[in-house]
């Protein structure tokens, strides 16, 4: 079942959702939009970083969170001088899969966080890599296409702890693996 | 049905906050809309910094830790306390902002190295004068849902001041729509599914969940005035403002079953039932 089918089902037959318990999906900003929101007016230079197994281990140890990706997606933000780092990261929780952007200052302060996309699920499918990869392309390619399908939700509070843990991990990664600006 | 809103989300208030605005003509393009949305997020952060129970440095924690002394507070904090005190009094304790002790005892909220004190109190335990407040007995205030709703309301005010005529702000289940465009609103059910509640213009809807196993992903907890847990279920309330809608979900949850609708209506809200409930 494709993501679009999942969402289509949600629109057509909302009453059936309690049984089907499908995912809700939200797309917010593109990478380019998030860059301009977090570092207005800056230019961005992609920075290739490959984490060594030792660095990954140190990040895990110091942040308490596992670093899954050995090639993190990082940009240097510049306007005159260096403003800081712009990093795209993903976290997988029990009920959600979240892609977000974090802006970190040269001194290791969090300048801001923006959610790029939020996939919610109550089944096991979120942990399947193929299913995730399908969304990844979609997120970056057509950010607002799904907008009319996005539900506005009143409901129980969902914890954002996973994202905050992710940001903590990125701050450690900055210390362990990124050059001083 | 399409709303084609420009949406952004941030992790705030311990949950996810979403702001969506109509882009384009009325606000002079996306850049200006984004600046307005950033300012609205900042307003939410301000509320969080002042009213968080978890943060030991917040205005609220300073008041809770002051052992009955007068504490100088931000005008926004005083406004929130004023609303919470009035709602506690007017609801006869069905909504009760003094149950912090009960929540600390249950381990839902941190103790900040203070003794629990009274599990709960009454509106009169809170004394207010210009610029300051004190707690006359060793109760602890918790404003969680009301503070979240107030944060939503202030974010909406910020967006409107920036010239945005239609949009919505959603924070951990509190949702407010402004502008005249009917906006579909769903409710997250206990099993995670979504139910369409209806379409909303210029109003707020809040949903609180009571019962189920304690879940670190859904940290909310409701206790009645006597410290007894409220009746399990989902409680959704419609009101003009989000702070009131959220506060009234507590009233709906703790009122006697046959007084539930009337208690909420008396306090200027309206219970929202999903199609399933209405049919039942």
Image: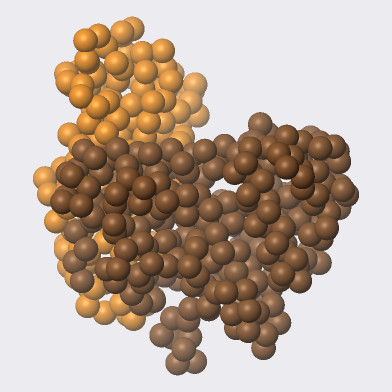
Q: Quadrant of residue A90?
A: top left
How many circles with numbers are drawn on the protein?
0
- In this view, the residue in front, B76 or B56, is B76
In the rendered image of the structure, the colour used to display chain A is orange
Is B202 situated left or right of B208 in this image? left
In the rendered image of the structure, the colour used to display chain B is brown
Q: Which residue is drawn at 43% across and 38% down?
A: B42
Q: Which residue is drawn at 63% across and 37% down?
A: B74
- In this view, the residue in front, B42 or A136, is B42
B30 over A82 or under it: above or below? below
Horizontal and vertical percent position of residue B6: 23, 51
Of the 4 image quadrants, the one containing the N terminus of chain B is: bottom left
Is A117 situated left or right of B140 in this image? left
> Would residue A118 be visible to someone looking at this image?
no
How did the renderer colour the structure?
by chain
Horizontal and vertical percent position of residue B163: 29, 49
A122 over B39 or under it: above or below? below
Horizontal and vertical percent position of residue B53: 66, 43
């Amino acid at each position: 079942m494709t993501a679009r089918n999942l969402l289509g089902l949600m629109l057509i037959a909302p009453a059936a959702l309690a049984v089907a318990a499908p995912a809700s999906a939200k797309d917010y900003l593109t990478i380019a939009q998030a860059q301009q929101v977090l570092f207005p007016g800056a230019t961005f230079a992609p920075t290739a970083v490959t984490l060594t197994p030792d660095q990954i281990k140190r990040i895990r140890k110091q942040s308490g969170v596992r670093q899954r990706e050995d090639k993190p997606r990082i940009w240097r933000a510049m306007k005159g001088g260096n403003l800081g780092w712009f990093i795209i990261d993903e976290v997988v929780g029990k009920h959600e899969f979240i892609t977000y952007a974090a802006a970190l200052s040269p001194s290791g302060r969090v300048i801001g966080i923006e959610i790029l996309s939020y996939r919610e699920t109550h089944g096991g499918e979120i942990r399947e890599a193929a299913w995730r990869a399908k969304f990844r392309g979609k997120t970056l390619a057509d950010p607002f296409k799904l907008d009319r399908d996005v539900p506005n939700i009143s409901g129980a509070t969902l914890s954002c702890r996973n994202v905050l843990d992710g940001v903590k991990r990125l701050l450690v990664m900055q210390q362990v693996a990124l050059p001083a600006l | 049905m399409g709303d084609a809103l420009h949406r952004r989300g941030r992790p705030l208030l311990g949950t996810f906050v979403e702001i969506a605005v109509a882009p384009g003509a009325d606000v002079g393009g996306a850049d200006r809309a984004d600046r307005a949305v950033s300012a609205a997020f900042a307003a939410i952060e301000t509320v969080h910094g002042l009213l968080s129970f978890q943060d030991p440095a917040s205005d609220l924690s300073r008041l809770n830790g002051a052992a009955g002394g007068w504490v100088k507070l931000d005008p926004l904090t005083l406004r929130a306390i004023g609303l919470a005190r009035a709602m506690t009094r007017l609801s006869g304790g069905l909504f009760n902002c003094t149950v912090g002790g009960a929540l600390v005892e249950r381990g839902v909220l941190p103790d900040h190295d203070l003794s629990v004190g009274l599990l709960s109190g009454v509106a009169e335990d809170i004394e207010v004068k210009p610029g300051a407040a004190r707690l006359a007995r060793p109760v602890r205030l918790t404003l969680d849902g009301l503070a979240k709703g107030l944060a939503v309301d202030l974010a909406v005010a910020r967006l409107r001041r920036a010239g945005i005529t239609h949009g919505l702000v959603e924070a951990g289940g509190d949702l407010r729509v402004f502008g005249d465009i009917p906006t579909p609103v769903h409710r997250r059910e206990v099993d995670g599914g979504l139910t369409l509640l209806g379409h909303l213009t210029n109003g707020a809807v809040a949903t609180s969940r009571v019962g189920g196993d304690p879940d670190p992903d859904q940290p909310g907890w409701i206790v009645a005035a006597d410290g007894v847990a409220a009746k399990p279920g989902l409680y959704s309330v419609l009101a003009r403002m989000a702070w009131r809608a959220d506060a009234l979900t507590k009233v709906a949850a703790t009122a006697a079953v046959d007084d539930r609708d009337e208690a909420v209506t008396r306090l200027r809200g309206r219970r929202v039932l999903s199609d399933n409930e209405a049919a039942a």
